[in-house]
Image: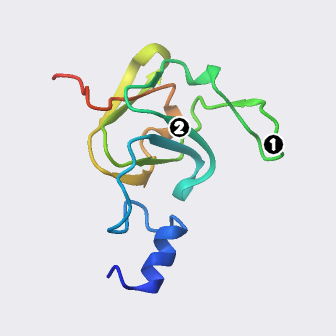
Amino acid sequence: MTGNSELRKLLRDHVALGCLEDSDPVRLVLDCRDRANLHGHKLRLDPEAMVPDLAQVPRQNEIGLWNLAWDNAIRSVDACAYPYSVSSDRNFHGVTHFINFRCSFNATSFGCTASAIRNWGTLPPEF
């Protein structure tokens, strides 16, 4: 499949969520987008980074002004290498979703309620 030009185009355009070409390195960062299918503005978290209050992190609106916040705005996620968690209330309170898989997806169950987020990197919590 890696020799398929149509598949390469889908991968390049980020339409095929959760797929990497064989030669692509695994991304260590956590990228959140404010639109489905990895479109829109991006919030990037490096490994072991966290944002306890997404209401304090500005994002652009449609005309490029920074007057919106990332609170309750995550619509798609690109996370390949490390687990991450999102919480419905700031400071990691409320309902927390721990995601421990290696792919990208549209955040349907938690994106509209995410108020805190953490890229666990190589230090996942013990359960």
How far across and down, in percent of the image, does residue 45 sit?
48, 33
How far across and down, in percent of the image, does residue 25 sit?
36, 56
Residue drawn at x 31%, y 45% as measured from the top left: 81
Q: Tell me if residue 9 comes above or below residue 74 in the rendering.
A: below
C-alpha separation, residue under disc 1 versus residue under disc 2: 18 Å
User: Relative to residue 77, is residue 95 drawn left or right?
Assistant: left
Residue drawn at x 45%, y 77% as measured from the top left: 8
The part of the image, by quadrant, that contains residue 53 is top right
Q: Tell me if residue 116 comes above or below residue 38 in the rendering.
A: above
User: Relative to residue 54, is residue 11 drawn left or right?
Assistant: left
User: Relative to residue 29, is residue 44 drawn left or right?
Assistant: right
* Numbered circle sitting on residue 48: none
Q: Amino acid at mark 1?
A: Gly
The quarter of the picture where the C terminus appears is top left
User: Relative to residue 80, is residue 67 drawn left or right?
Assistant: right
Single out the mark in the foreground, 1 or 2: 2
How far across and down, in percent of the image, does residue 42 sit?
60, 43
Residue drawn at x 55%, y 68% as measured from the top left: 13
Dot 1 surroundings within 10 Å: few (below 14), some, or many (20 or more)?
few
* Numbered circle sitting on residue 44: 2
Q: Amino acid at mark 2?
A: Arg
Residue situated in front as seen by the camera: 84 or 46: 46
How far across and down, in percent of the image, does residue 63 sit?
84, 46
Q: Dot 1 lies on which element?
A: loop
Dot 2 surroundings within 10 Å: few (below 14), some, or many (20 or more)?
some
Name the N-terminal-most of marks 1 and 2: 2
Q: Dot 2 lies on which element?
A: strand
* Numbered circle sitting on residue 64: 1
Q: Tell me if residue 62 comes above or below residue 13 in the rendering.
A: above
Residue drawn at x 74%, y 38% as measured from the top left: 60
